[in-house]
């Protein structure tokens, strides 16, 4: 598995920028006023280099929670210098109709319990299966897809999800709200109107 549009392993910066431009042109065709957490937290790789704590499947087998951190929030001091601050989040995917994991590693299983994985990149709405009722006249929910590239124990892991809603909540909502409101912090979320 790989991304359908993005190529994060380009040999030159120019090739990378072309892939990014094509990807953001793809995103322009979608309504960003619905499922706002998908766009806000996944369009610009908010979680890039974040540590994945766990994936958790709900008892209904249609809800999937991803626990991870965002290490990309900048805290500026009076001189303009900054340091990175990390905040933990839970991303809850609802009405999941497809979930798959594949990796590029060896086929021999080895026990790596306790070792974390790292969120690298994601790609929105390039893996939606044919036949879903994603039109405005339908009473069925609209579906979205997310492909996530993860760095595991010396291998690349791909997660492919199709779902109707994602809610992203900080584990410390008050602290995150303060950071979003305080100009001393740069919180790199995607805002279509900004």
Image: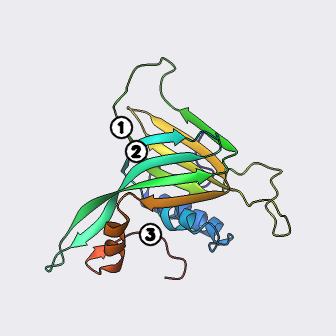
Q: Label 2 neighbourhood size at 10 Å, few (<14), some (14-19), many (20+)?
A: many
Label 2: element kind: strand
168 or 30, nearer to the observer: 168
- Give the mark nearest the N terminus, 2 or 1: 2
Task: State the residue at coordinates (32%, 74%).
Answer: 178
Residue that badge 1 annotates: 116
Task: State the residue at coordinates (80%, 59%).
Answer: 140
136 or 122, nearer to the observer: 136
Q: Decide: marks 2, 1 in contact (CB < 8 A)?
A: yes
- Counting from the top left corner in percent of width and height, residue 76 is at 21, 74
Horizontal side, residue 117 vs residue 27: left or right: left
Task: State the residue at coordinates (17%, 73%).
Answer: 81
The N terminus lies in quadrant: top right
Q: Label 3 neighbourhood size at 10 Å, few (<14), some (14-19), many (20+)?
A: some
- Give the mark nearest the N terminus, 3 or 2: 2
**Above or below, comparing residue 154 to residue 171 in the picture:** above
Horizontal side, residue 56 vs residue 89: left or right: right
Q: Quadrant of residue 160?
A: top right
* Mark number displayed over residue 50: none
* Mark number displayed over residue 52: 2
Q: CA distance from mark 3 to mark 1?
A: 24 Å
175 or 4, nearer to the observer: 175
- Give the mark nearest the N terminus, 3 or 1: 1
Total numbered circles: 3
Q: Is residue 6 visible?
A: no
Q: CA distance from mark 2 to mark 1?
A: 6 Å
Residue that badge 3 annotates: 189
Task: State the residue at coordinates (51%, 31%).
Answer: 104
């Amino acid at each position: 598995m790989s991304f359908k549009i993005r190529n994060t392993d380009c040999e030159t910066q120019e090739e990378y920028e072309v892939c990014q431009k094509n990807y953001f042109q793809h995103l322009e065709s979608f309504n960003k006023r619905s499922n706002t957490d998908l766009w806000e937290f996944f369009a610009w790789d908010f979680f890039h280099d974040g540590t994945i704590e766990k994936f958790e499947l709900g008892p209904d087998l249609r809800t999937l929670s991803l626990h991870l951190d965002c290490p990309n929030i900048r805290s500026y001091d009076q001189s303009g210098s900054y340091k990175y601050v990390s905040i933990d989040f839970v991303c809850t995917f609802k009405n999941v109709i497809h979930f798959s994991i594949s990796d590029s590693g060896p086929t021999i299983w080895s026990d790596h319990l306790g070792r974390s994985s790292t969120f690298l990149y994601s790609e929105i709405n390039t893996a939606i299966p044919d036949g879903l009722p994603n039109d405005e006249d339908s009473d069925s929910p609209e579906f979205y897809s997310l492909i996530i590239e993860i760095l595991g124990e010396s291998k690349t892991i791909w997660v492919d999800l199709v779902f109707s809603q994602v809610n992203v909540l900080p584990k410390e909502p008050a602290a995150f709200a303060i950071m979003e409101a305080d100009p001393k912090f740069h919180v790199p979320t995607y805002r279509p109107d900004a």
